Amino acid sequence: MNLPPFQEMLPSLGADLLDDAGGALFISVAILLLFVGAEVASRVLSLRVEFTRKLTHVGAGAVVLGMPWLLEHTVTVVVLSLAFAGILVGGRVTGLLGSIHNVERRTGGAYYYPFAVLGAWILSGGDALLYCVPLAVMAVADTGAALVGQRTGETTYKVMDGERTLEGSVAFFVLAFGVTLAGCAIAGRPGWPDMLLITLVVAGLTTAAEAVSIRGSDNLAIPYAAWLSLERTERLGLESLGDWIVGMALAVTVLVVTGERAKLTAAGAMVVFMVCTLSYALGGWVWFVPLAVLYALYLFVRRPEDPTELDMVFPTTAGSMIVVLIYAHTDAPSLYLAYLTTVAANGAMAGALLAKRRGWLLVPAVLAGAMLPVASAVVFVPQTSLLLPVAGGLCAPLLYVLLSRVGVVGRRPVASLMCGLAIWWLPF
């Protein structure tokens, strides 16, 4: 009798879960005891929620770091992650986990935590270094930064509806540097001095990711940023490591040259740093230059009196950076046209805004905004098609208007990404 594929898989899944039963039980009991201890500390000892929340953050991190030695199968990690996500949601609904959820600020970090663990497990592919370092940075550096910021932080900067401190960000960098260096040293890879340079890259990128993450999304952004920079430099060696260093140097140069002109806030500067670093490190000059031209176009369009905040930089670059990250995972050359289309789309929307503000003719302004970033790519890749990215980019202003009518959130990145994916999926 032929069974459906799913039914054929059931015995194997059951065997995998049974094989990991001992390790899964240990992890489950340890985390449940951590939750109970935090609740007792909160209700009986009247400890502040911020303290008990950080206690469970670090404690859970310490427990899950043992997974590579306690578990073997991905299905077990999936079940554990979903189970603890369900417990966290249930604790919120019933009020039984007030030691974690009863904070005044809006955050979903607790809910993201189990999926950060699952994502690190899948991305690492069983490599203990690539699994443990990202989660350790999230658990230790993030907690340390929060405690330093709350106790000694005086130099504050806003991130959307949240707030960070310079002292907290410095503490995060120092702790991320120490955790990454310790992890690499224990694993014995890579060799010296590559280890020091890789540590610097991981600490720099994760610090920027933490600084601009809002509402708990740092529990996803930090481990991913750590994994990405560590895995790429580990796998590709000195060549990739050099690209990361050059990318960071370019990012710092852009900030020094344009920071005053753009009136970059701390959060806006962090996004520019990440965009410059990732576009060059993952794609080289041919991916960096179009975004640099788009940034120059933004400097021309912006009002001189307006500061450049996170909510101005991120929506303009998010669609393009999603394509960059997909390219980093796939190395598919066909994604370059999709990437150019997302940049052209944001250029076209910038042109439409400029025409509205200055009373210029709409069509020439939109066309120029779409063409300029794409034309810059032809300098490096002469065979690059101008027609397809520009044509796709020209659709973005109209799509933006349509999305505005239906109240879609994140209209700029959605419009640019939709245009890019449409060009990528064309049958030629």
Image (tube, rainbow, N blue to C red):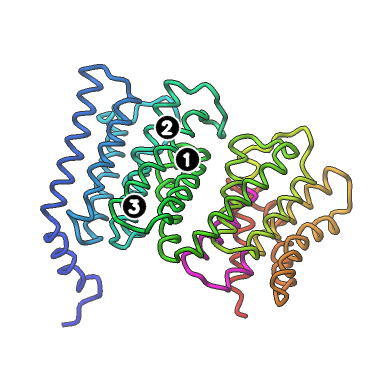
| Numbered label tally | 3
Q: On the rendered structure, is 72 left or right of 201? A: left
Task: Mark 3 or mark 1: name the one nearer the start of the chain.
Answer: 3
Q: On the rendered structure, is 335 left or right of 60? A: right
Q: Residue at coordinates 31% horizontally, 39% vertically from top-left?
A: 89
Q: Residue at coordinates 29% horizontally, 39% vertically from top-left?
A: 88
Question: Circle 2 — which element?
Answer: helix
| Nearer to us in this view, 238 or 214 | 238
Q: Residue at coordinates 61% horizontally, 75% vertically from top-left?
A: 426
For residue 372, above or below residue 411:
below
Q: Residue furthest bottom?
A: 1
Image depth: mark 2 or mark 3 in front? 3
Image spot of residue 388 (x, y percent)? 70, 71
For residue 130, what is the image quadrant?
A: bottom left
As drawn, the label of residue 184 is: 3
For residue 369, above or below residue 307:
below
How far apart are the alpha carbons under marks 1 and 2?
9 Å
Residue of label 1: 210
Split into 4 quadrants, where in the image is the N terminus?
bottom left
| Nearer to us in this view, 351 or 198 | 198
Residue of label 2: 145
Marks 2/3 in contact by CB < 8 Å: the verdict is no
